[in-house]
Each structure stands twice: as structure tokens, then as C-alpha cells.
């Protein structure tokens, strides 16, 4: 029963996530634009936790000559990415790996000009594993390369959260819950 429910949830995830794509489009475009390379450069990008490919699509829209490697632990999610990125078939590569363990980078064609990720790495859950992953990412970057991560983070405690609240833009969908 668990396996069937898991498959059904994984099949719904891309549709659920794509419904939020218009809200995330500006964020993903900014993430891609922050890659420190000329827009016409033939850059190499690694997309961690790539899922159905929204980050890769933003990178390819910004860098038309880019080569993007989509890395995810779910074959089903990578299969959802293939038709969404079919127009870029010659520029994308799909790699099945598990970021929760060291060694995920073995066999990759490194280095990369950028490593990108969005809404994925927090799912690892273990702050020590996430910190170790950041070191592993640094080893696959080319000199002058960048790691850009759009993800959920904690502000670091009540004092910092209060300071953040002072500079946070007004919420889009009603007041901040106290």
C-alpha cells in the first residue's frame, strides 16, 4: 500500500509544483541571472534536486548555449522533466543520484560553472549533511563558479527574525500571522 501511495504522490507532485511555477518564475529567473557568466557563454550547470526541471528551464532561457545536468534521486521526477525540456534535448543530461550520502558527485563530468538548486536541499533534513553537501558542491565548481540555492531557511532565531520582519516586503497574501 505504501509503495502505491508513494507512486501516486510522486505522480501528482509535478502538477502541484507546476501550478506554482508562475509565482516562482521571477525567483527562478533571478537565480539564473545571478550566474556570473556572460549570457552568450557555453556554460556548464549542475541542477541539484532537479525534479521536473523548472530551474534547468530558467537557466536555459537565460543562457541559450548552456549545458545542464539535472541530478535527482527520483527516476520518476527525471522522467517528468524529459518532455518539459524536450526542446533542449541536446543540452541536457539526466543523472540519478542520492544527495543524502557522500559520493553523489563521483563520475560526473566536472567542473561546473554553476551549481543551482531550488526548494530541494532542505529535504535532506540533517543540518550536518547539508553542511557537508556544501563542501562537496565546492569541489565540483570551476574557479570563479557559483553555487546558487533558492530554498527554505530559518532566520536563525527570534532576534534575527524580528530584524528580518523590519525589512521584509509586505506579504502578498494577507498579513503575517503572529
Image (cartoon, rainbow, N blue to C red):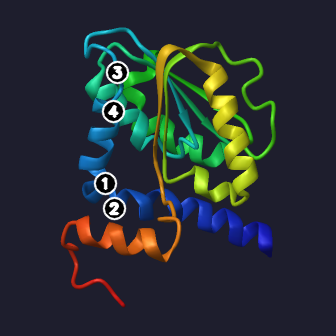
Circle 3 SS class = loop
Dot 1 alpha-carbon crowd within 10 angstroms: few under 14, some 14 to 19, many 20 or more:
some
Query: Mark 4, mark 3: which one is toward the viewer?
Result: 3
**Mark pair 1, 2: CA separation:** 6 Å
Disc 3 crowd, CA 10 A, few/some/many (<14, 14-19, 20+): few
Q: Is residue 52 above or below residue 137?
A: below
- The answer to whether residue 85 is left or right of residue 137 is left
The answer to whether residue 4 is left or right of residue 27 is right
Secondary-structure class at tag 4: helix
Q: CA distance from mark 4 to mark 2?
A: 18 Å
Report which residue position mark 2 lands on. Answer: 20
Total labels: the figure holds: 4
Mark 4 vs mark 2: which is more N-terminal? Answer: 2
Q: Quadrant of residue 174?
A: bottom left
Q: Residue at image x 27%, y 26%?
A: 62
Q: Residue furthest bottom?
A: 178
Residue at the (33%, 33%) spot, across then down: 32
Q: Which residue in the structure is indicated by mark 3?
A: 36
Q: Quadrant of residue 2?
A: bottom right
The CA span between labels 1 and 4 is 12 Å
Q: Earlier in the sequence, mark 1 or mark 4?
A: 1
The reply to whether callout 1 and callout 3 are in contact (CB within 8 Å) is no
Q: Find disc 4 in the rendering and name its residue.
A: 32
Q: CA distance from mark 4 to mark 3?
A: 9 Å
Amino acid at each position: 500500500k505504501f509503495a502505491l501511495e508513494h507512486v501516486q504522490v510522486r505522480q501528482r507532485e509535478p502538477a502541484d509544483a507546476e501550478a506554482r511555477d508562475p509565482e516562482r518564475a521571477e525567483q527562478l529567473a533571478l537565480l539564473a541571472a545571478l550566474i556570473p557568466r556572460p549570457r552568450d557563454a557555453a556554460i556548464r550547470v549542475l541542477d541539484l534536486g532537479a525534479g521536473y526541471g523548472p530551474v534547468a528551464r530558467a537557466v536555459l532561457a537565460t543562457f541559450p548555449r548552456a549545458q545542464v545536468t539535472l541530478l535527482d534521486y527520483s527516476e520518476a521526477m527525471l522522467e517528468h522533466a524529459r518532455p518539459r525540456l524536450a526542446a533542449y534535448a541536446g543540452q541536457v543530461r539526466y543523472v540519478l543520484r542520492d544527495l543524502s550520502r557522500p559520493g553523489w558527485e563521483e563520475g560526473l563530468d566536472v567542473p561546473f560553472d554553476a551549481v543551482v538548486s531550488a526548494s530541494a536541499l532542505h529535504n535532506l533534513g540533517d543540518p550536518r549533511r547539508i553542511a557537508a553537501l556544501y563542501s562537496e558542491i565546492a569541489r565540483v565548481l570551476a574557479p570563479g563558479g557559483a553555487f546558487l540555492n533558492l530554498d527554505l531557511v530559518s532566520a536563525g532565531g527570534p532576534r534575527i527574525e524580528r530584524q528580518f520582519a523590519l525589512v521584509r516586503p509586505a506579504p502578498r497574501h494577507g498579513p503575517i500571522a503572529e
